[in-house]
Image: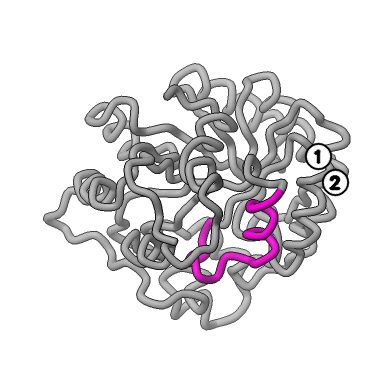
Amino acid sequence: MAVPEGIGVVDLMIGFPFADKKQVYANLQAGLKDRQSSEEFAMPAEYMFKDIPDEAQDDSDPIEHTFSEMERWGIDKGLFGLSETSIEAKRRYPGRVHFVTEVDPNDAMGTIRFLKAKKAEHDIKAVSVFPSGLIPQVGVSDPLMYPLYATAIELDIAVIANAGVAGPRFPSAVQHVEHFDQVCYDFPELRLVMRHGAEPWEKLAMKLMLKWPNLYYMPSAFAPKHYPTAIIDYANTRGADKVMYAGYFPAGLTLERIFTDMANVAFRDHVWPKFLRENALRVFKMDD
């Protein structure tokens, strides 16, 4: 069916065009060992995507470009990485910009202090972590992650963690979905969101969401025609409140590609408002 109009989409993974993509991912370069990833790719998982959005032009305004695309595709709000650009975007478009910030839990106390400062200064709604991309890697259920989880509960913010095989050519065991089981047991107050699809363990992700009330999922970085069938079936039955939209613009997908594909996703009528808006507002506590 066609995607319903007028929902006011909340995009949980959106940003602004990059002037130098390779520089954006410079923090991941030290962990890459193959020549193609480190020398040829502008972004470390480039082999996975077709028609990656172009880099920003020198004379363009990245904020206005993104918001023009948001208007075109019916996106009301976005969860943006905290940066000087996104801070300026929030000034221009109040009520439409919310912040997530990424951390390295290897520095446990530094992470705690950083999160408390950013919550006080910018009212961040979430913290994200890429377990496979850290040096050294830190698993989702590793003790080094526990201060992060405890602080997120204290600050009443959600935690977003990559789940499944990593896109960049890093080992992926630290992102195995089974790790989320232990975390949900130890932190029942935590709002924990699996990012980037959880494949090839998407059926386990579905089982764990049935089990744990505080575990959620977003198919970020997937063109909608590639959303896992198990997740679509889950959202259509018992999981309508657990699955929420996140794109991947401008890192790997255009909004045109995403929303053109979206019409082919077999969600039932009652799922669309929850998937595209309502779940995000609730889980990330965005003022509606």
The span shown in magenta is 220-237
Q: Earlier in the sequence, mark 2 or mark 1?
A: 2
Magenta: main secondary structure: helix
Image coordinates of residue 269 in percent, x first then y, are 51, 49
* Amino acid residing under circle 2: Asp
| 161 is higher (above) or lower (below) than 231 | above
Using the image, determine if residue 122 lies above or below residue 162: above
In the image, 102 versus 98, the foreground residue is 98
Q: Assess whether mark 1 and mark 2 are in contact (beta carbons under 8 angstroms).
A: yes
Q: Nearer the viewer, residue 109 or 152?
A: 152
Residue drawn at 41 percent across, 49 percent down: 14
Q: Position of residue 283 (x, y in %)?
A: 59, 32
Q: Residue at x 41, y 67 (%)?
A: 261
| Left or right: where 78 falls relative to 110 | left
Residue 276: image x %, image y %?
47, 45
Residue where numbered disc 1 is placed: 212
Number of residues whose C-alpha sits closer than 10 Å to that of mark 2, classed few (under 14), some (14–19) or many (20 or more) = some
Q: Quadrant of residue 182?
A: top right
**Structural distance between the alpha carbons of marks 2 and 1:** 8 Å
Foreground of the two, 31 or 217: 217
The residue labelled by disc 2 is: 181
Q: For the point 31% across and 63% down, which residue is it?
A: 256
